[in-house]
Image: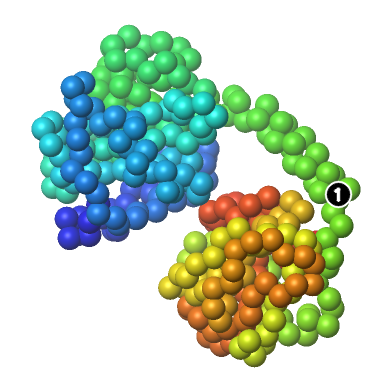
Amino acid sequence: MPKEKWRTQDRRVKNFTNYLSRKDRLGSIYGDIQIDVINIELPIAKIGANGMVSEFELRKITNQYRENYNILAVVFADVEGSRYKGAYYPNTLKNDTIMDTYILTDENSIENRLSGRFKAFERRLEHEIAGHGASLDLGLTNQGNTNEYKVGTDNTHLFFYDKDRGGIDQYYKELNERWVSQRSTFQKILDVFAEAVEKLQKKNSKVKPLAPKHWKNITQGYGVKNPSYKTTGYHIGVDFGCPIGTKIRARENGEITLVGFHKDLGNFCYFKFKGYEERYLHLDKEPVEGKYQQGETIAVTGNTGFSTGTHLHLDTFINKVQKVTKTNWSKITVDPLSI
């Protein structure tokens, strides 16, 4: 959605996430909900004979983002043919865990809803993401298009359009009741799994720890509360103060899987080894992708990106680098000094 066509999108998406994060909406299930808005130039949506955008066409846009998100929603501001529709594709490909959804709308269109008149943009997001998406997560499948209420199925359409069923408030109430009934079982499974993973990691961990001689150079530790980090509110890595050009050596045999530049991260690289993947940020220049042996130089420090002084930022993710939120950062990252 190009910014010039969606002038108010940042404010509206923020308001929408606050609305969904309420306890009487989806907050009890997901905690603080976060939606990222990525502005990219999109092609005009091509509508097929069935009046929908094909999943194949949608994936041409979403594939580049699939590693970091659970749900990918594309909003088309320009549409050929029919307008103001939406659809979702609930993990239809083999081994796919990502739900794709798209919305056909424009910035100013208005739609009636049981509880009032709403901008179609928010109403479509709620229907596709909060409606079908949350239903799917809670095991409610077999989306129906009829006015017949069916226990254990995705009744999004019924609740969003039929005031006799109590409307959207009743929809969220039923989702939360279903979550409460399932939570104890889910939590037991999660606890057992987490315990098994922790034991396995400790058993197999032979990672060479960071030498204590480097600890004196730490300028900001892991888990420090810092409001300047808007996403989490905490520092998820360790900062080491050091001159530009200081060599960074691989502490284990591993592989640089990704290099690049970001306006905040500066020059960066991902280094994967023994069940972990680390990010090295603010580097002097982009390293070279490939495999490295323990002790080999993999990068050199710099002062690129958003940096208040020459330093190396190092954070360590379990298994692979993932998108962090206020609620998951401490579960998917570890203190680099602790392994």
Left or right: 296, with 87 as reference point: right
**On the rendered image, what quadrant is the C terminus found in?**
bottom right
> Which amino acid, by three-letter code, is at mark 1?
Asn
Q: Nearer the viewer, residue 256 or 20?
A: 256
Left or right: 301, with 111 as reference point: right
Residue displayed at 83% across by 68% down:
209
The x and y percentages for residue 67 are 51, 46
Left or right: 61, with 238 as reference point: left
Q: Residue furthest left?
A: 81
The x and y percentages for residue 65 are 43, 48
Task: Report which quarter residue 255 is drawn in.
Answer: bottom right
The x and y percentages for residue 78 are 15, 44
Residue displayed at 59% across by 68% down:
288
Label 1 crowd (10 A; few <14 / some 14-19 / many >=20):
few
Disc 1 target residue: 204
Is 135 situated above or below 116? above
Task: Report which quarter residue 211 is drawn in.
Answer: bottom right
Is 41 situated above or below 29? below
Residue displayed at 63% across by 52% down:
320
Is 228 situated above or below 50? below
Q: Nearer the viewer, residue 262 or 290?
A: 290
Residue displayed at 21% across by 21% down:
50
**Looking at the image, can residue 24 be seen?**
no
Left or right: 66, with 170 as reference point: right
